[in-house]
Image (cartoon, rainbow, N blue to C red):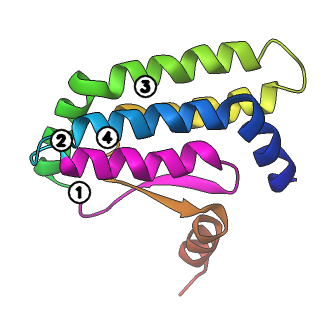
Amino acid sequence: MRTLLNLIWLVFAGVWLALLYVFAGVLISLTIIGIPFGVAAFRMAGMALWPFGRQVVKKADAGVGSTLGNILWFVLCGWWLALAHLISAVALAVTIVGIPLAAGDLKLLPVSLNPFGREIVPTDEVRAAVADRSQPR
């Protein structure tokens, strides 16, 4: 089911959203200071291409640097990438088939606003980690 959703997503939203992230990454990487922001944009472009079966989780070791990076990211390009996700989600939600895709689009919204201090991991790893924590010791 994930593969089918990802293929439909790729056709209707994934390609142009990934291109927006790549554009943002190239634009912000023009300066040496912006390279970490570009790396984050390229990482999110991969998630925008194939979002189902992956999840965004907070890093436990994220600190003040992540917060400062997120503030700069929001000002420079986060708000317009988030706006693109909102527009795409509304357009996808118009049809019944597009509702799960719109939900996937909204899943990407928080990471488009705050990419630093977050990690993209397979959903199976998240489930395994949650199952390990719920086991009595």
The residue identified by callout 1 is 62
Which residue is at 61% across, 79% downward? 135
Quarter-wise, where is residue 85 in the image? top right
Region rendered in magenta: 35-61
Q: What secondary structure is marked by label 2?
A: helix
Q: Which mark is residue 81?
A: 3
In the displayed structure, would residue 84 be above or below residue 27? above
Q: Position of residue 131 (x, y in %)?
A: 63, 73
Which residue is at 47% across, 16% downward? 83
Is 133 left or right of 100, judged from the image as shown?
left
**Gap between marks 1 and 3 measured at Cα:** 22 Å
The residue identified by callout 2 is 69
| Residue type (three-letter) at the residue carrying disc 1 | Ala
Closer to the chain start, of discs 1 and 4, is 4
**Gap between marks 1 and 2 measured at Cα:** 11 Å
Closer to the chain start, of discs 3 and 2, is 2
Which residue is at 10% across, 48% downward? 32
Callout in the foreground (1, 3):
3
Q: Position of residue 81 (x, y in %)?
A: 43, 25
Callout in the foreground (2, 4):
4
Callout in the foreground (3, 4):
4
Answer whether residue 57 is magenta in the image: yes
| Residue type (three-letter) at the residue carrying disc 4 | Val
State if disc 2 and disc 1 touch (CB < 8 Å): no
Q: What secondary structure is marked by label 1?
A: loop
Q: Is residue 116 visible?
A: no
State if disc 4 and disc 2 touch (CB < 8 Å): no
Is 125 left or right of 84, judged from the image as shown?
right
Q: Which mark is residue 26?
A: 4
Is the residue marked by circle 2 packed among few (<14), some (14-19), or many (20+) residues within 10 Å? some
